[in-house]
């Protein structure tokens, strides 16, 4: 876009920008609360993973360092799929499969980008990953929600190793949750990936 087009966009959409920005963050929080509440009430083992898990761990050290995320990612046992579907349906979610990813859309008009995405415990997210996903039981209770254990969260991020995953690991390094001793917790090449981030924490 050129400067004239950007000015026109601001004139048209400017009054709504901050409502949309803060509203989107609130919707993610509400979706996470509702999903965790439904699974917990039904006794379905789960763990929050992904960006929300990173944010929860970062918040234990520095709330000002929290990075917002649009994703709600949940770890479930494959054998609990039907129980989770029933529990989440009560909370208004409906199960779908989009491009081989199991997700729970937020209502009949829900979008995949605003869904609860599922990772299955004990399975590799992608064949090239070094290790499979952990179990929901490998989690910690943080204010009534099961958040994946920090060691396992970092393992998942190192497996995925996308730009945003490396940013998330750097966030954890920046608040002092990961130090020079941590590469020894992981097998090659995950330990090498973590060492690279420790060597260059600012990217």
Image (cartoon, helix red, strand yellow):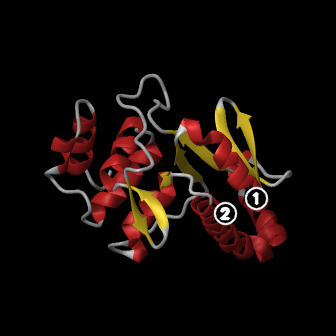
- Quarter of the image holding residue 12? bottom right
Q: Between marks 2 and 1, how big is the CA–CA gap?
A: 13 Å
Tell me: 182 left or right of 58: left
| Residue 146 visible at all | yes
Tell me: 55 left or right of 69: left
The residue nearer to you, when weighing 41 against 57, is: 41
| Residue 1 visible at all | no
Location of residue 147 in the rendering, given as x and y in whole percent from the top left corner: 44, 59
Q: Residue furthest top?
A: 127
Question: Mark 2 against mark 1, which lies toward the viewer?
Answer: 1
Q: Are marks 2 and 1 in contact (CB under 8 Å)?
A: no
Q: Residue at x 46, y 73 (%)?
A: 143
Label 2 Cα crowd, 10 Å radius (few <14 / some 14-19 / many 20+): many
- Earlier in the chain: of badge 2 and badge 1, it is 2
The residue nearer to you, when weighing 52 against 134, is: 134
The residue nearer to you, when weighing 79 against 153, is: 79
Q: Residue at x 65, y 29 (%)?
A: 100
Secondary structure of the residue carrying numbered label 2: helix
Location of residue 106 in the rendering, given as x and y in whole percent from the top left corner: 76, 55
Location of residue 151 in the rendering, given as x and y in whole percent from the top left corner: 30, 50
Secondary structure of the residue carrying numbered label 1: helix
Eyeballing the image, is 67 above or below 79? below
Quickly name the residue at label 2: 31
Tell me: 187 left or right of 145: left
Location of residue 128 in the rendering, given as x and y in whole percent from the top left corner: 42, 23
Quickly name the residue at label 1: 90
Eyeballing the image, is 81 above or below 61? above
- Quarter of the image holding residue 78? top right
Q: Residue at x 61, y 63 (%)?
A: 41
């Amino acid at each position: 876009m050129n400067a004239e087009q950007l000015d026109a966009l601001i004139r048209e959409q400017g009054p709504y920008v901050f409502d949309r920005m803060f509203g989107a963050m609130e919707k993610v929080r509400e979706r996470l609360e509702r999903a965790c509440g439904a699974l917990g009430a039904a006794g379905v083992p789960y763990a929050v993973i992904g960006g929300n898990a990173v944010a929860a761990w970062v918040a234990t050290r520095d709330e000002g360092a929290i990075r917002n995320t649009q994703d709600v990612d949940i770890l479930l046992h494959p054998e609990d799929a039907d129980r989770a579907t029933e529990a989440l349906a009560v909370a208004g979610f409906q199960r779908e499969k989009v491009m081989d990813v199991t997700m729970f859309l937020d209502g009949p008009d829900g979008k995949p980008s605003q869904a609860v995405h599922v990772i299955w415990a004990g399975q590799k997210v992608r064949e090239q990953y070094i290790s499979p996903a952990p179990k929901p039981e490998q989690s910690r209770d943080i204010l009534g929600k099961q958040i994946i254990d920090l060691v396992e969260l970092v393992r998942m991020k190192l497996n995925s190793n996308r730009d945003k995953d490396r940013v998330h690991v750097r966030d954890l390094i920046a608040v002092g949750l990961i130090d020079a001793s941590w590469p020894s917790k992981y097998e090659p090449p995950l330990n090498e990936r973590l060492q690279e981030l420790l060597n260059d924490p600012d990217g």
